[in-house]
Amino acid sequence: MLITHDSDRRLRGEDIPSREITDHGVYLNRRAFMAGAAALALLPWGREASAQGALQPLQASKSAAYKVQDALTPYKSVTTYNNFYEFGTDKGDPAAHGASLKTRPWTLKVDGLCAKPKTFDIDELLKFPLEERVYRLRCVEAWSMIIPWIGFPLSALLARVEPTGQAKYVEFTTLVNPEMFPGQRRGLFGFALDWPYTEGLRLDEAMHPLTLVTVGLYGQVLPNQNGAPIRVVVPWKYGFKSAKSLVHMRLTSEEPKTSWNKAAGNEYGFYSNVNPEVSHPRWSQATERRIGELRRRDTLMFNGYGDQVASLYSGMDLKRLY
Ligand code: MTE
């Protein structure tokens, strides 16, 4: 991402004190235990819980087919070390300011080149058959996490609107609301993207079974800082393709303009496939740090999903189309 006031060390995830890294079960138990205690708001790990209230649990079948075997990243890290520039550019801003996002009422408009455009209410989307899928998330900043997401394939949603033969891409758009998103108030921070945050996929990437419309993580609805109430997760691409708090998906014939590409086209391409052989102009992508671990790991081509997605790119020069 654009390095502003974050130091390199922080961008690489080397700054989470071990006392902040807490297993999710321990976290929930502690939270329940502390619920009656007035001390809740005083404790560092109680802050988000008290700001956003208890998160609604979600029923989801556990997918064996879409589960990486690596150890899960602790809930605490998943929900306090975030990129969500609408809340600010610091990793802690999304958790600190997340409570200002109101996720009801919420609708997602799906339109463009399709026979049956439709606006879905979030509660209708929560009725799709939900699956828990454990995916690797590899951020372009060379850190990664293992997260148990809850959602359903984007292909199931797109089937409802019946894309026409002209549709070649899907554009994703995040909510614009400067009252809810302090980072969208221009001038408040040194750096701002051109809002709304937009992202895009080729239609075959969008229809790929790995591409997940995501409504929850760790057994509950998404915390605001992770993109509540609805986002996409595209696990073989750098994390910035996985746009948060979506209000619009549009089927198009032309490649959508994307926020990071507009901000720094020489650093962030449209494809953004995880690729250890193509360095970011300012750092290598060959290795990564798993949040919560000290040693670095080798980054895997397509983030380890190559056997499932490499055929989407056969014949393409992935060094040029980064
Ligand atoms: N979506 C929006 N709307 N705004 C953002 O700043 N950041 C992206 C992506 N989606 C971002 C976004 C980046 S860079 C990453 S790495 C992931 O969200 C992080 O998702 P997580 O915080 O749930 O781990």
Image: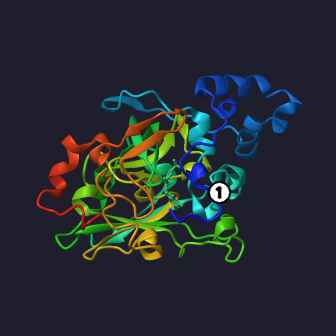
Along the line of sight, which residue is nearer the eye, 61 or 16? 16
Along the line of sight, which residue is nearer the eye, 134 or 10? 10
Position of residue 95 in the picture relative to residue 149 (left or right) = right
- Tag 1: amino acid: Asp
Q: Quadrant of residue 4?
A: bottom right
Q: Quadrant of the C terminus?
A: bottom left
Position of residue 321 in the picture relative to residue 262 (left or right) = left
Along the line of sight, which residue is nearer the eye, 133 or 73? 73
- Percent from the top left, x then y, of residue 296? 45, 37
- Percent from the top left, x then y, of residue 152? 37, 44
In this figure, which residue is indicated by the disc labeled 1?
A: 90
Q: Residue at x 16, y 63 (%)?
A: 316
Question: Disc 1 beta carbon < 8 A from ligand 1?
Answer: no
Is residue 226 something that shows in the picture?
yes
Q: How is colour applied across the structure in the image?
A: rainbow
Residue 224 position (above or below residue 50): below
Position of residue 191 in the picture relative to residue 109 (left or right) = right
Is residue 130 something that shows in the picture?
no
Position of residue 87 in the picture relative to residue 39 (left or right) = left
Q: Residue at x 50, y 53 (%)?
A: 122
Q: Residue at x 83, y 27 (%)?
A: 36
